[in-house]
Amino acid sequence: MIIDMPKTTTTAVDKRLVDLRDEGGAVALGRVLTLVVVADEKDVELAVEAANDASREHPCRVLVVAASDGPADEARLDAQIRVGSDAGASEVVILKTSGPLREQPDAVVMPLLLPDAPIVVWWPREAPEAPSKDPVGRMAQRRVTDSIMAGDPEGMIRTLAENYATGDTDLAWARVTLWRGLIAAAVEQPPFEPVQSVTVEGEPGHTSLDLLAAWLSARLRCPARIVHHEGATAITRVTLERRTGSIVLDRPDSRVVTISETGKPDRRIALPVRKLNEALIEELRRLDPDEIYEEVLTKGLPLVDAEAQKVTA
Amino acid sequence: MRPAKISAEHNPLRDPRDLRLPRIAGPSGLVIFGVTGDLSRKKLMPAVYDLANRGLLPPGFALTGFARRDWEDQDFAKIVHDSVKEHARTPFREATWEQLAEGIRFVQGSFDDDTAFENLRQTVEKLDEERGTGGNHAFYLSVPPGAFPVVVSQLQKHGLSTPQEGSWRRVVIEKPFGHDLESAQELDAVVSEVFDQESVFRIDHYLGKETVQNLLALRFANQMFEPLWNAHYVDHVQITMAEDIGIGGRAGYYDGIGAARDVIQNHLLQLLALVAMEEPVNFDAQALRAEKIKVLSSVRLPRDLGRHTARGQYASAWQGGEKVVGFLEEEGFNPDSTTETFAAVRLDIDNRRWAGVPFYLRTGKRLGRRVTEVAVVFKKAPHLPFESSLASDLGNNALVIRVQPDEGVTLRFGAKVPGTAMEVRDVTMDFGYGHSFTESSPEAYERLILDVLLGDPPLFPTREEVELSWKILDPVIDYWAGKGKPEQYPAGTWGPPSADAMMARDGRSWRRP
């Protein structure tokens, strides 16, 4: 069910939500969080779709705040409530702000937050330079950015690193989790040898490469290099060099990884590129600070950048 | 900068704070005996696929089927494919399937056929070479318990049960683990002659269910329930597992087994242990086992079994708009059977926490509806400051943990009825675990198969637990054996009158789940 509420107020929206619950129990029980999406108008549907999928695993109220292109002088709020089959396992409220209200997303969101439940804010494309200082970001326990979708991904992830605050996280990190799992399992097999250097290859602008290289570099205490290939999709190859041979994880077709190791049969496993909804589901699973991400961002990434400079110099 | 050391015990890429990093099983393969069975088609194979789809199986994973059918690898792959398409939880992805299919093998033969086991050994060795399974293999015996000894000894005879240095071999067995203490011990002797205790995984799929694990979260992650979780506040506990179906095609298996052996011995006593045990030191297998064993060994049977147990057989009746046949008239069934299809027992736990709090366990087939739940029923408030007539509708407070279906927790308490009088009546507050979570939460078998491959045993009952359960149940079954035929109850009702009488003697009554 979709209910349009043009030219409205948050009080009216809130009242309507309560009525809906009274009428038909249209609202899922046991919601665990409020997901606030701060999006451009054009990204609203994309964000709602991913959030709906995520809500099936983490029942939540989804509030999408989108600055609208309406007249600049009139403060106006247009809302839309989606429940039932249009809203996954939760309710979705889309709030389009115009005029001076565009600058006040926090005020618009505030009355509609679930009592007591944690708040997660998600910027599906561009994000503030310091998410924790943003008015909406400040309210949230968890601030999710998505550098891969941004105009300048590599620049953005480094700005985020400079401004890191507890609770920040980026979907590029969630996208690389299965790779990390595979690599961790690969070095757990004999021969147990230190890894001497790492190369991560793939798509230019795909910040998962940067984060994976940073993680490996910081954890394995070895130099890590990033190689970009025009036309590649996501991560295409990871090479771990050891004294007696290398471990190569190769994914040329963005579907199947082949693991080749000196002296062992090749092993293959399906590892499709992670979709947005899968990354978001993982992101919402835990709301406590991700200390490993912090380390990767603030310690690992500078290591990788220093290594890259050494190579060019 | 010296590169970080890596050893078998220490992997610098793992960190206890890194909660995202999935635990992917190491190189390994799974061999299923009895692949043509229902369980294998409906649960095991789909679970293997779902694990693969979630990226939790190792690269190069191999699935080998063993059965009598005259199949080639491709025929078996087709069977797996169909069962996955029909029963898997996660969407079908061609890439995942192709990878899985590459590792599917089939070995034809019967259990006493030496050539077949020789073939199996060669298949497994070839998998190590081709797919890199590294000599790690789990053998899943989805076969009748009667076949365990022969399969296990064949595994040993053909060198399949002995791992090479640095690899493992594990065996997975399904309930029933024997039919009484003696047979359980015999069975165990057979298995442990070949595999050591750490390599034997007994599957009780209930323990893989999210709700059952949630029971531990509910009790030990919260402050508000545990203080009430004792004889001061709890009046009694009811643990119910009801099925609305009859024995159907399982007649051959069911005759002589009955509800108590089939369900109480494993599922219900395990649930009882989880509800009643003390807080474990941590959630390691060792610590959990210690607490479960402690509580199971303090379980006491009532002195007069006739007064505190009940059993029955379903009789022909109209069940939910359908005429169903009685147990004794089921096709291919022994019409003089004394096997019970309903069983209820009262158990007491002799420790400080539970002294004087009876645990009532009941299970049955062809009952009112399909439900499994644990109901903790609290004592009445010691004093009600209301006029007694106004609070007469007020029952005991209760906390009900629904295991299936519609997983969740219900809290039952009194609330004021709107109006001028201070009238109080029961209301329920409902947490629907299933409403929104379970759609994408893993099946029990996924969790359990992964745990087998990882060698992680907390969710598997141990030999001692199995033996303790038999010790509890054996006297009841012996007593019933001397008492002739069970009482009949119409299909679709909640059991025989003696079950209600047994509760009435204690001044209590069964909940209608």
Image: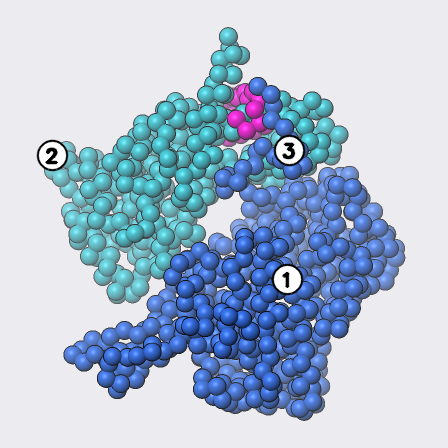
Chain colours: A cyan, B blue
Near mark 3 (Cα within 10 A), the count class, few <14, some 14-19 or many ≥20, is many
Q: In which quadrant of the rendered image does the N terminus of chain B lie? A: top right
- In the image, B113 versus B149, the foreground residue is B149
Q: Secondary structure at mark 1?
A: loop
Quadrant for residue A22, please give it.
bottom left
Between the C-alphas of marks 1 and 3, the distance is 32 Å
- Lateral position of residue B340 relative to residue B31, left or right: left
Q: Which mark is residue B289?
A: none
Give the image location of residue B149, x and y in percent: 80, 64
Q: CA distance from mark 1 to mark 2?
A: 69 Å
The residue lying furthest to the front in this view is B352
Is label 2 or label 3 in front?
3
Query: For the residue marked with disc 3, what is the amino acid?
Result: Val
Q: Position of residue A21 (x, y in %)?
A: 27, 62
Q: Residue B323: in sight, yes or no?
A: no
Query: Eyeballing the image, is B209 above or below A66?
Result: below
Q: Is residue B454 magenta?
A: no
Q: Could you say which quadrant of the image residue B409 lies in?
A: bottom left
Mark earlier in primary sequence (2, 3) = 2
Name the residue type under label 2. Asp
Counting other residues with Cα less than 10 Å from the Cα at mark 1, is it few (<14), some (14-19), or many (20 or more)?
A: many
Per the image, the residue denoted by label 3 is: A187
The chain containing the residue under callout 1 comes to B
Residue B355 is situated, as x and y percent measured from the top left of the image, at 50, 75
Quadrant position of the C terminus of chain B in the picture = bottom left
At 86% from the left edge and 60% from the top edge, which residue is drawn?
A: B113
Give the amino acid type for the residue marked by disc 1 in the picture: Pro
Spot the residue most to the left.
A73
- Give the magenta range: A218-239
Is residue B400 shown left or right of residue B491? left
Q: Give the residue number, with chain letter if any, for mark 2.
A: A73
